[in-house]
Amino acid sequence: MSTPSVSFEFFPPKSLEGSFRLWDCVNTLAPLAPTFVSVTYGAGGTTRKLTHEAVSTIHKTSGLNVAAHLTCVDATRAETMEIAQSYADAGVREIVALRGDAPKGQEKFTAHPDGFASSVELIESLANTGQFTIRVGAYPEKHPEAPDQAADIAFLKRKIDAGASSAITQFFFEADTFFRFRDACVKAGIDAPIIPGILPIENWNGTQKFSAQCGTHIPQVIHDAFTNATRDGTTDLLATALATELCDELLRGGVDHLHFYTLNRPELTRDVCHALGIAPKARLQNVA
């Protein structure tokens, strides 16, 4: 079993303290030589400017390959493509293209009158520029807005056919969840890489809430384990062990790339990578 390649997701800072935390996260994980790192977009496009600043700064100062999240929310087509062009002008050539969540206070996504109606339209426009490698989201468990998983997979195929080169999944907690999804994608004619998204559980209460929102099943054995670990003060040890075991099962099942949702807390992700044999390979360059 060979050592996998890895990638990491960060979110943009909203305060000075957050800026230091993001840079610490980059500094901690960059030596693991990720294939790329991505920076998220806040719900409703609320961090559009912050995302652009974070992407540009990481790209300039770290030498890492940065993928910028881009959504269809609350912007015209022209405005969205201007943002994309500004990334290209800054030397950023990877985009994670998403529909995006509804702005706060809205129950569901509603397209801007002059905006992209779906991620498929956004992907087509990005692909037509010929300037980007485009990645998209995928859902190994049914998306809350989808009628069934077959509809999720059919839509994923539309995104790949529109010009995306790979998909990154929502997090999950059982390897078989990913394997069933991967097999269904292959059966549907999807031949692009499906990258599993891994969430080391840094905050158990937050993870439960997030999982409920996005339809991710948490097995009872994990609930029971965290109840005991919270009582014993060993939640970090448990989180590292569970994520490492999940990744090991995925690698044994043929996965060769792991994408970690860091939540800008790098220690658990770093420890899981070390446990998998992913050793530091490089140091940051051009630090301002």
Image (cartoon, rainbow, N blue to C red):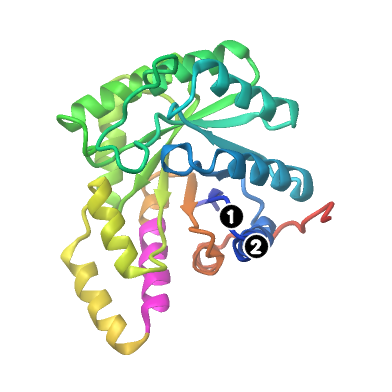
Q: Are marks 1 and 2 in contact (CB under 8 Å)?
A: yes
The label shown at residue 13 is 1
Q: Quadrant of residue 107?
A: top left
Above or below 41: residue 188: above
The image position of residue 125, as x and y in percent, is: 52, 14
The label shown at residue 249 is none
Identify which residue is drawn at 49% across, 19% down.
Answer: 76
Q: Which image quarter is the C terminus in?
A: bottom right
How packed mark 2 is, by other alpha carbons closer than 10 Å (few <14, some 14-19, many 20 or more), is few
Task: Tell me the distance, in whole angstroms, between the alpha carbons under discs 1 and 2.
Answer: 8 Å
Q: Quadrant of residue 152?
A: top left
Instruction: Tell me which segment is drawn in magenta.
Output: 234-248
Q: The residue under label 2 is which amino acid type?
A: Leu
Q: The residue under label 1 is which amino acid type?
A: Pro
The label shown at residue 16 is 2
| Secondary element type, mark 1 | loop
Q: Nearer the viewer, residue 198 or 212?
A: 212
